[in-house]
Amino acid sequence: MTKQMNSILDINRSAKTTIRNLKNPRAITAIFIVIMIMVLFFYVLRLLEGLVKKAPQIVMLFPICGVGMIILVLPLIMFICYQEDFCNVNPLNPKDYIMLLKKTCNALKNNNFKITAKDL
């Protein structure tokens, strides 16, 4: 069963609705997940920093960790910014998160790595 998504053109985006939407439990959950991913990312960076002193080749893992963090966080940021487009999506559900990831990657790929509301 596919989820019904709102059309981008049917939505009136204003600052007032954005602030109101941050009180949404799904948005709060997504913000918490983003914070936890960032904490984990900084922990891994500190761990790698300590290991680089023993094995300098490990420095090549820094860019991989950075790209991984961006890949994990970007769909959640898109969800937080454009909640009206993902009305029945829960970021804690793995299937929904994969759907967010696919939509974000397709929007990035099709628009020269720039995302606007009309691309989602």
Image (spheres, helix red, strand yellow):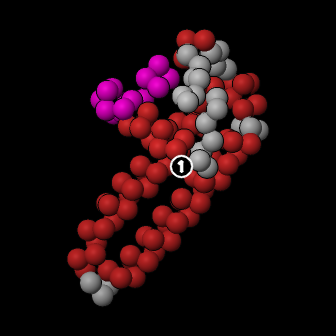
Q: In this picture, which residue range is highlighted in magenta?
A: 106-120
Give residue 101's quadrant in the image: top left
Q: Residues within 10 Å of mark 1 (few under 14, many from 20)?
A: few
SS at mark 1 in the image: helix
Q: Is residue 103 left or right of residue 18?
A: left
Q: What x and y, as percent, mark residue 65? A: 37, 62
Against 38, residue 60 (above or below) is below
Q: Is residue 103 magenta?
A: no
* Image x and y of residue 32, in percent: 65, 53
Image coordinates of residue 71 in percent, x first then y, are: 41, 49
Residue 68 seen in the figure = yes
Give the residue at the far bottom of this rendering: 54
What residue is disc 1 on? 94
Q: Amino acid at mark 1?
A: Pro
Say whether residue 115 is magenta: yes
| 39 relative to 74, above or below | below
Question: As drawn, is 80 to the left or to the right of 53?
Answer: right
Determine the residue located farthest toward the left in the rendered image.
57
> Considering the image in quadrants, where does the N terminus appear?
top right
Q: Is residue 118 above or below residue 109?
A: above
User: Image point 67% across, 41% down: which residue?
Assistant: 27
Q: Is residue 77 visible?
A: no
Q: Residue at x 43, y 70 (%)?
A: 45
Residue shown at the point (60%, 11%) measured from the top left: 10
> Farthest residue in the top direction?
10
Residue found at x 30% / y 68%: 61
Residue 71 position (above or below residue 104): below
Nearer the observer, 35 or 10: 10
Q: Position of residue 46 (x, y in %)?
A: 45, 75
